[in-house]
Every structure is written in C-alpha cells, then in structure tokens.
Amino acid sequence: MIEKEATKQALIALEYHIKWLEYNLIDEVFLLSQYQYFIDSEDKCTEHYRYAAFQKILKDNQSLDDKAINRYIQLAELDNDKYMANSALMNLFMWECLNDAQYTALVNHSAFSHKVFQKYHQNKILIQTIDSVNLISDEVLEFYIQNYESIIQEYLLNK
C-alpha cells in the first residue's frame, strides 16, 4: 500500500497522466526515481521530467509499433505544457527509427498539422529529392540558395 501511495504522489507531483503507467510507457521504478530526484533537486519544473520520459521512450527503442506511437501522441496531447508536448512530438516526428508508413501517418495526423511540422516535412522531402539527383546545375543551385531556408542552403553547400 505504501508503494502505491508513493506512486500516486509521484504522478501528482510530476503531473503525469495516469495513462503513462497504464500504457507502460514508464514504469513505477522510473517514476519513483524521477520523483526522488524531483524532491531532492532544485529543478521543480515538472515538464522537464515528463520530457525526459518522452526522450527515454525514443532513446530506448529501435522501433515502436503503431499502438505505442498513438499512445505517445495521446500523452503529448493530454499534457498541460503545450510547448514541452510539441517538442516531444517534434522529437517523434524526427525520430530516425520510424518506418516510411509510420512517418507518412504522422505527416497526415492532426497532431502534426502545425506549420513547424509541415515545414520540417517539406525540407525533408526536398533534401531527399536533391539526393536523388546526381548533378545539380549552377542555376538550380543558385535558385535554392536564394529561395530556401538556411538548412537547405547548408545542405547543398556541403553536398
């Protein structure tokens, strides 16, 4: 009973939704460890701890099934700190372990409709297109340098 009470206190103090545990995206050991650190630390920004949990999910896995990805998105959408949640969503969007079908599903998912996600996607597609071309003319190169963001310019100059 004491352990369950500690888990409940940790969830409340760190502002985790109960679904984090229900979905097994964190376990009680991780949660209680974070809670102890939170108690002992000067860092009382609870979103830092939840963001670390999102990062851990991506770091600890070579792949996630569609169900786990949907749960990750749902937890981000449920979070009260929208800035942190959007950062966690961007990390998922940029995660190199997504397969093509999963990435396409994210591109079309309402959680990723904001222009930041769509701009990242456009740049990714443009870089893939550039990579598929063996030789770029000076005129095309100049066009990209004059008309596209610095990330595309740098990519072209380093190609």
Image (cartoon, rainbow, N blue to C red):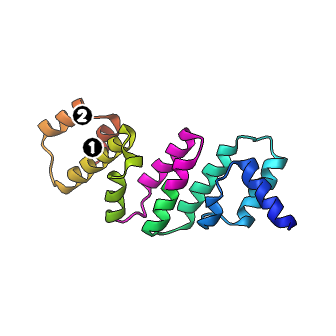
Q: Is residue 7 left or right of residue 89?
A: right
**Residue, far right:** 2
Question: Is 95 a magenta residue?
Answer: yes
SS assignment for the magenta stretch, majority: helix
Residue 93 in the image, given as x and y percentages of width and height: 42, 53
Magenta segment = 74-99
Q: Residue at position x 57%, y 66% from top?
A: 60
The amino acid type found where label 1 is placed reads: Leu
In-front residue for pair 30/156: 30
Q: Residue at position x 12%, y 36% from top?
A: 139
Element type where label 2 sits in the image? helix
Element type where label 1 sits in the image? helix
Relative height, residue 52 to residue 42 (above, below): below
In-front residue for pair 32/12: 12
Residue 83 in the image, given as x and y percentages of width and height: 54, 38
The image's mark for residue 136 is: none
Question: Is 94 a magenta residue?
Answer: yes
Q: Residue at position x 85%, y 68% from top?
A: 1
Residue 21 in the image, given as x and y percentages of width and height: 65, 64
Q: How many marks?
A: 2
In the figure, residue 9 lies in which quadrant? bottom right
Residue to which mark 2 is pinned: 145
- Please say if the residues under marks 2 and 1 sit with CB atoms less than 8 Å apart: yes
Q: Is residue 2 left or right of residue 129?
A: right
Label 2 environment density (alpha carbons within 10 Å; few <14, some 14–19, many ≥20): some
Residue to which mark 1 is pinned: 156
